[in-house]
Image: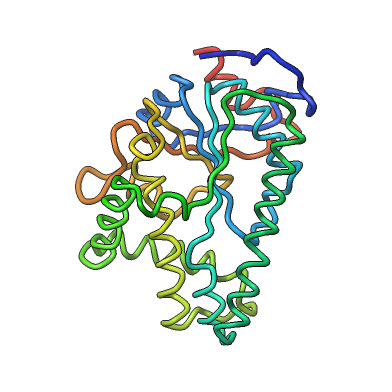
Amino acid sequence: MRETLPGERATPVDPTAYEAFPFSGRCREIWRRGEHLLIGVSPGNSYFSHRRIAELIGWGLEFFERIDIVQADLHVEAQYESFGYTPEHARRRADKEIKATARRIARGVEEAGPRDGVRTHALSEFTGHPAYRRLHRQAVEALRGDREFRAAAEAMARGFLAARLDEGLAPNEPQLAAGLRYIAAELPFFLDTPALLGVPSSVSCYHLRLPLTPVLFGREEGLRAAPGQAYAVVRPAAPTAVVGAVAENRAA
């Protein structure tokens, strides 16, 4: 696993700025290979500022050969419609949010400085990919017939929708259905990023542990992540953390 990347760094890199927590032993082994890191960015998620994206790129290239950033841009309009927006207003709001997210990603990549091995994509670019179609179909089928998977996906959708609801309110059925369609569109990259991007192995990362994580990466039956797919929580290191989990990975 590579320690540094030659070339100019516009954003200073602190390899201890973030902590990484691979979900399982297998996830840790894939992390240690250092072949690929996937960063998913959702519209409206204020966590992913352009500065955060630049930092994650610089930090990630200390441990991985390649990084891909995928922006979720599918079914955003449907969510707005489920909240009562007219179709035209929903399209405008979704378009505005998607474009703003794309600008943040582009600015973050630019701020990170000239680097090999970093690519950006919109999720919609993959809808015609045979592997994406296969994985998406498997996710939709699991939502219909796998109770454990469905319960975890619904918990994930409720958490996602909570940011758009008044405090204390639960999503209604149309809102939950729209949230599940949005999640199902992203799931192929949690299931098998190597099949989608042609990399040997991949670590999908997010700053929180998601309800679907133990289902896809911990159980022994049902829909699960591919052998070359891992998941890790990657978050800013606590101020008192000297090294954190990343140091363990660097020393391995």
Residue 139 placement, left or right of 66: left
Q: Find residue 1 and report its horizontal and vertical position in percent.
A: 51, 14
Front residue (pair 225, 217)? 225
Q: Find residue 247 and report its horizontal and vertical position in percent.
A: 60, 20
Q: Find residue 203 and report its horizontal and vertical position in percent.
A: 45, 34
What residue appears at the point 56 percent right and 77 percent down from the top-left corner? 80
73 lies above or below 55:
below
Residue 52 placement, left or right of 119: right
Front residue (pair 209, 241)? 209
Front residue (pair 73, 140)? 73
213 lies above or below 22:
below
What residue appears at the point 62 percent right and 67 percent down from the top-left corner? 95
| Count of number-bearing discs | 0
What residue appears at the point 61 percent right and 73 percent down from the top-left corner? 164
243 lies above or below 2:
below
Residue 190, image quadrant: top left
What residue appears at the point 30 percent right and 53 percent down from the top-left corner? 133
225 lies above or below 244:
below
Residue 149 placement, left or right of 59: left
Q: How is the image coloured?
A: rainbow
Front residue (pair 230, 94)? 94
Residue 225, image quadrant: top left
Q: Find residue 130 and report its horizontal and vertical position in percent.
A: 29, 47
